[in-house]
């Protein structure tokens, strides 16, 4: 898995198809990932049709990868299948609650990441769309997800047609804590975030956004309190409609 | 990453230490995993001391791996560090909401799974403890997690001292959907779950639990509605105390 050391998100794909045989092998292998009680509380909806990609795009702010990638995968937390199994077997399922959503979302996200690791090792390029949880109801409606199924991850997948620079990372000591959590002093923040803020691309990012600091670009423009609160309400509403919150 | 095809969870570890150099290399490499806006919204608390393992064990139902593994990793959704960064840089963070918890939990779980894949490729054995979200307040108190930090995954890690049989998996067609979600008929359930139910170990599992079906063992004993609802309330309470729900 040496590819991890050179990985970057890929947003431009060549015209070459991702064959069913390869895709199915990767989807099968990823299922070796551990899950809660070996219940595999996830489902994957595979989107290849132009029509369905166009319908999904608005939920992802019309990022061009959604319509341009040969394959879009929507990975869902799924307690519907396990609950159907229970009902077919004289058992009363009790999974219409928030903990069960977290259990299934965990299974789905771990599965997703093994899939990503495997796909990148195969030379495929992909982009993980965090937008999946922003307006989940649009995705639920488009993919016809029933109760107890909730989208938690989207992957756009194809053969790379770009080789973007690798993005920076925080140093190990900034996110690893020895025995107990040690909170961050202003000096720690300077030490850990200084190199990121000093990157020419980030300085440019601050300039074009007319801000004073990189953190302001994040807090005031990219991920604002107002948007986060509106989308939190939307997600809670979707969790209720899908039956995970009463 | 061919190890994925033979992976199993490992619950018994040899006395051999997991060196700091190896652990730190794996924790560093795993951080190449994509995160929201490259913010790396996670922290890892490394537990090596016997005293801290003993304190963590009850939160994980005293499963023996917690005290027997040389290393226990608790991976947390962390918006505290990014918020501290904002406050040190004249920006007002807006991450005290449910969507931000989901964003950070996603980052944390994807990071965790890349770490697991890298560690297993290195020959290490590990067990993912789903119990992390069952009684999170005990873990929060033990590891002294501040506001906007929430444990979402625990890994017990060491060199394998067992080689358990591989567990079964559902067939690919049971969890992959073409273009839209297709709900499960009773015939689908029979086809997908029949092989699992026919396994000798699962038949034995039904017998020793005095149940009629495997699904009843799950719904009536292992993961009950009553427990799920109580733990859902506990998790919501912890999310409120940690500042992710107002």
Image (spheres, coloured by chain):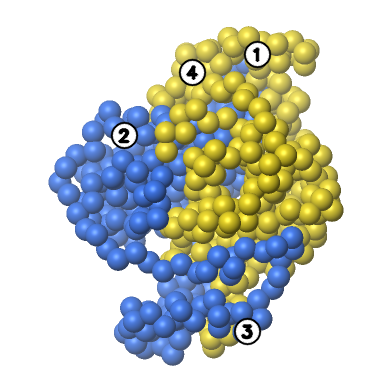
Chain colours: A yellow, B blue
Question: Are labels 2 and 4 on one chain?
Answer: no
| Quadrant of the rendered image containing residue B118 | top left
Which one is in front in this view, the residue at disc 4 or the one at disc 3?
A: 3
What residue would you read off at disc 4? A192
Measured in 3D between alpha carbons, the distance from the residue under mark 2 to the one under mark 4, in whole angstroms, is 20 Å
**Residue B186: which numbered mark, if any?**
3
Q: Which mark is first along the chain, 3 or 2?
A: 2
Give coordinates of residue B236: x percent, y percent: 57, 54
Which one is in front in this view, the residue at disc 4 or the one at disc 1?
A: 1
Which is more toward the observer, A13 or A103? A13
**Residue A201: which numbered mark, if any?**
1
Q: Residues within 10 Å of mark 3 (few under 14, many from 20)?
A: few
User: Height in image: A221 above or below A238?
Assistant: above
Q: Residues within 10 Å of mark 2 (few under 14, many from 20)?
A: some
Give coordinates of residue A112: x percent, y percent: 55, 50
Q: Residues within 10 Å of mark 1 (few under 14, many from 20)?
A: few
- Give the number of marks: 4
Measured in 3D between alpha carbons, the distance from the residue under mark 4 to the one under mark 3, in whole angstroms, is 55 Å
Question: Are labels 4 and 1 on one chain?
Answer: yes
Task: Look at 65% across and 20% down and name the residue there.
Answer: A215
| Quadrant of the rendered image containing residue B90 | top right
């Amino acid at each position: 898995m040496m590819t991890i050391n050179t990985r970057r998100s890929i947003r431009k794909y060549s015209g070459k198809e991702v064959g069913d045989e390869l895709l199915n092998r990767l989807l099968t292998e990823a299922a070796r990932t551990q899950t809660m009680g070996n219940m595999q509380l996830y489902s994957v909806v595979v989107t290849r049709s132009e029509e369905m990609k166009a319908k999904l795009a608005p939920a992802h702010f019309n990022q061009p990868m959604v319509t341009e990638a040969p394959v879009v995968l929507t990975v869902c937390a799924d307690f519907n299948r396990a609950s159907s199994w229970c009902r077919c077997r004289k058992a009363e399922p009790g999974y219409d609650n928030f903990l069960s959503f977290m259990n299934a979302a965990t299974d789905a996200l771990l599965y997703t990441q093994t899939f990503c690791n495997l796909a990148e090792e195969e030379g495929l390029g992909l982009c993980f769309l965090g937008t999946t949880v922003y307006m989940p109801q649009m995705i639920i409606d488009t993919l016809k997800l029933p109760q107890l199924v909730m989208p938690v991850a989207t992957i756009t997948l194809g053969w790379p047609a770009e080789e973007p620079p690798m993005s920076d990372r925080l140093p190990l000591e900034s996110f690893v804590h020895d025995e107990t959590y040690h909170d961050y002093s202003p000096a720690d923040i300077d030490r850990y975030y200084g190199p990121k803020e000093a990157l020419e691309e980030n300085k440019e990012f601050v300039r074009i956004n007319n801000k004073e600091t990189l953190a302001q670009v994040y807090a005031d423009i990219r991920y604002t309190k107002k948007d986060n609160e509106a989308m939190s309400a939307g997600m809670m509403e979707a969790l209720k409609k899908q039956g995970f919150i009463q």
